[in-house]
Amino acid sequence: MSSTPFLPFSRPTIDEAAIAEVVACLRSGWLTTGPRVERFEAMLRDYFNAPHALTCTSATAGLLMALLSLDLQPGDEVITSPMTFAATLNTIVLAGGVPRLAEVERGTYNLDPERVAAAITPRTRAILPVHFAGLPVDCERLHELARARGLRVIEDVAHAIGAVYRGKKLGSFGDTQVFSFHPNKNITTGEGGCVVTRDEAMVKRIQLLRFHGIDKDAFPEQKQRGLPHYDIALAGHKFNMLDMQAALGIHQLPRLEAINQRRRELAQRYYAAFQGFPGLILPATPAYPHTHSWHLFAPLVNPEGARVTRDELMARLKQAQIGAGLHYQAAHLGSFYQKQFGYRRGDFPNAEFISDHVLSLPLFPDLAEADQDRVIAAVKRILAA
Ligand SMILES: *Cc1c(COP(=O)(O)O)cnc(C)c1O
């Protein structure tokens, strides 16, 4: 075997300024939530042109807090996609709701708005779309549906920071958006997330939920005298972002456009290389104006044109020192969701087809073109009939 180093499917790009900021944070003596979180939140508000950007420990925490703010009652439903990470459905359940799945489009892997419309029941409280791989869902259609029925729209934007829908950045319009800063995502704080919302009541709830339910504004008289009195207004969580994490974010956010631009160029190189190659089915492009954030390049292995299965391809790529991701096994195939909510294989054929054939090829800003060419050559060699 050669000594080719292992090529991961994703790798963060951390610059020296970010490293220096973390070191400065450590030297400052203030590690937990403080001035750097404040600065990062101000940058996020500015970036999204939004009144509130509430950082937290992860997108999972953000989704949970946004959903808890809805005060779901037993039996209340939240419509979401089976083509997503576990966190999207789990947080609906943890917030007391029922995840009501709707079928996705075979080409884009995004929720099919017509299937969302058909999934609405009298118990529906919210729609939770996922912008898969960084491709914006048809926001207008989903927001229209929600408006007509008085539903909330909580968007899972874990893949799509910087993506644009009809000229508007995701997060700069709509109801509530949850972003992830996990190391695999387009920008990172190590772990971390944020909730962008235009709902003042949700802001207050999340501020309580993310730090023990503590309300420091409950006793204005004492506060004015500089006293530390607080109320415990609810049984909260411990989901506050650290200054050590925000130190990274402060230097990642200004680089986002450049990072996404490079991701876009590399995705275009994949498209060009695989155009007309029968072994793969490439992700489809919707007609509405949008800019993709290319969190993932996730084609399908074409069962009609490939010599081996997706699983075999992934195993052989690994032997060739190439990492690939599986995003995702359709959520309704998970044993918990089958037992608890009665989902079965067969319920969502498009999601299942994607689940059975999808893989994420290496895509990150520092991916060398020579390494990408090695991936392309390996995929073609393994799949070619
Ligand atoms: C990564 C991811 C999450 C969870 O993000 P964390 O910050 O790791 O909690 C949620 N939804 C989707 C679609 C994701 O890819």
Image: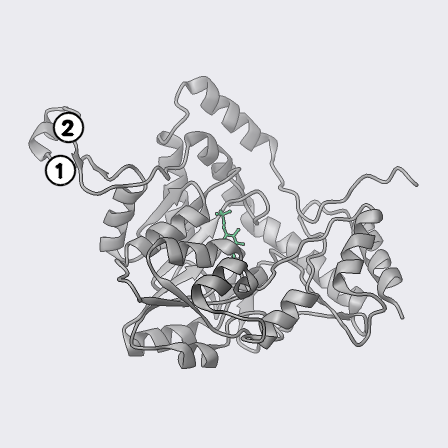
Amino acid on which disc 2 is placed: His
Of the numbered discs in the image, which one, if any, rests on residue 229?
2
Write down the quadrant of residue 29 in the picture. top left
Name the residue at 24% across, 40% down.
Answer: 213
Q: Position of residue 37 (x, y in %)?
A: 39, 35
How far from the left and from the top, in percent, is residue 269? Answer: 75, 61
- Give residue 205's position: percent from left, percent from top: 25, 49
| CA neighbours of label 1 inside 10 A, class few (<14), some (14 to 19), many (20+) | some
Q: Residue 83: x, y in percent? A: 55, 65
- Quarter of the image with the C terminus is bottom right
Q: Which mark is residue 218?
A: 1
Whether the residue under disc 1 has CB within 8 Å of ligand 1: no
Residue at 31% x, 75% y is 147
Q: Looking at the image, which residue is at 30% across and 58% down?
A: 198
Q: Is residue 193 above or below residue 303?
A: above
What's the mark number on residue 346?
none
In the image, taking residue 147 as reference, residue 160 lies left or right, namely right
Q: Is residue 243 left or right of residue 344?
A: left
Decide: marks 1, 2 in contact (CB < 8 A)?
A: yes
Judged from the image, the secondary structure of the residue bearing numbered disc 2 is: loop
Left or right relative to 11: residue 231 = left
Amino acid at the residue labelled 1? Ala
Q: Is residue 242 visible in this depiction of the protein?
A: yes
Does residue 277 appear in the picture of this structure?
A: no
Type of colouring: one colour
